[in-house]
Amino acid sequence: MIPLIFFVIASDLNIRAPSSSSLDRGIFLHLSITAAKQPTPEQRNSGAFKGKRKTMELTKSKNTFKKKKKKDNIKNKLSRGKAMSKVGRMKLGSQGMEVSLQGLGCMSMSAFYGPPKPESDMIALIHHAIQSGITFLDTSDVYGPHTNELLLGKGVREKVELATKFGIKAGDDEKFEICGDPAYVREACEGSLKRLDIDSIDLYYQHRIDTRLPIEVTIGELKKLVEEGKIKYIGLSEASAATIRRAHAVHPITAVQLEWSLWSRDVEEEVVPTCRELGIGIVAYSPLGRGFFSSGPKLLESLSQDDYRKDMPRFQPENLQQNQTIFDKVNELAAKKGCTPPQLALAWLHHQGNDVCPIPGTTKIENLNQNIGALSVKLTPEEMAEIESLADAVRGDRYGDDLSTWKDSDTPPLSSWNAA
């Protein structure tokens, strides 16, 4: 009864306990209770006193319930906006680079997938990714162009691994020009450093291979930039096995970025084995089939008119119905595993080896958290085989005629090069 009695007296007398030491508080409590006038047995048994005590207890109970309800609401909100666990780390390639087990592709924040998204929302997303352990962020100077790098330059101040790219120039006529000559390589690097507001780029990719000049010429300039401290590691994107070998002979390549997913598996025959032979890390972009494994064919209904995917062969009506069967099957398998279709598609990639880092892109925190959840999905060899059998049903090319891929990335021999 002492705590209750003290509560009544302290509140009635407007007494506040000192906050100095435990001993002082103990003395204060003793003196307050001793000095206060205690109710007589008759007063305790009176209806007025009992009613007052009951009212106080009910009020206290209601306040406790309100506090608990408010706390639960906050907890629920946090759980919806917070990743379940911290993303682990991995070695990317054999040159010493370390990144998060899963990266974040930032392209859709600024370009190609509809209008640019609100800057404040994207910065909040980037910060959430970093706090969740995703520190490997992927961009390019052609995304925007330039605006995606500027976004990361504003939004990133923590220790991360920034990867950007050069080699695709967006012309005034909205057509792309592939460029890899030494002067442009240096100019592009300087521009990216300035926009990203950094002194050195962690991983610098050649975005597409310029087939007008030997790959050795482009890599030679990148090697100089490494020696000058302007970039730390060199990467290639959409490069053939032969081009990778030639580039690696000039300077070690840390990572090759390629489209690898359940509906893009052509790299498994030559490119992936070559990377593994040379100790080169593999970065898988568009691991969710450009959003297809998130929503299926209904994805098209939500795309804006300027969304690049509307013109991609696999999203055309003549191919979409066939590709629908793939999504339906993935959906079915995901339901059996107790995960979502995107998580199943990402888990399949994570099971390809500890040298593979997928970089799914998103503009929503809830999707980011879902992608992170794929790291917890375990697949048996039998399940892997069942999932892989779906690839044979894919219909349509990855790109139209506007952009090259690794299949047409071989370059002239070095002996043909005339610097003049």
Image (cartoon, helix red, strand yellow):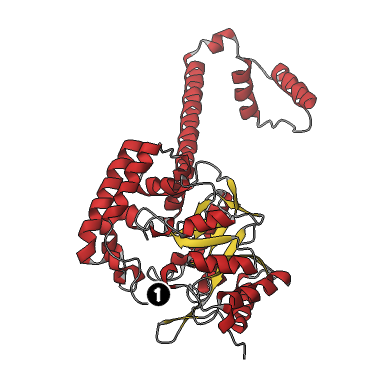
Residue drawn at (75%, 33%) of the image: 19
The one of 292 and 19 positioned closer to us in this rendering: 292
Residue 9 in percent (x, y) is at 63, 24
Residue 66 in percent (x, y) is at 46, 34
The one of 407 and 180 positioned closer to us in this rendering: 407
User: Does 25 sit above or below residue 75?
Assistant: above
Q: How many marks?
A: 1
Please name the amino acid that badge 1 sits on: Leu
- Whether residue 265 is visible here, answered yes or no, is yes
Residue designated by label 1: 403
Which quadrant, please, contains the C terminus? Answer: bottom right
User: Does 68 sit above or below residue 182?
Assistant: above
The one of 37 and 350 positioned closer to us in this rendering: 350
Q: Which quadrant holds residue 92? A: bottom right
User: In the rendered view, does 220 fall on the left or right side of 110?
Assistant: right
- Whether residue 339 is visible here, answered yes or no, is no
Residue drawn at (46%, 69%) of the image: 110
10 Å neighbourhood of mark 1: few (<14), some, or many (≥20)? few
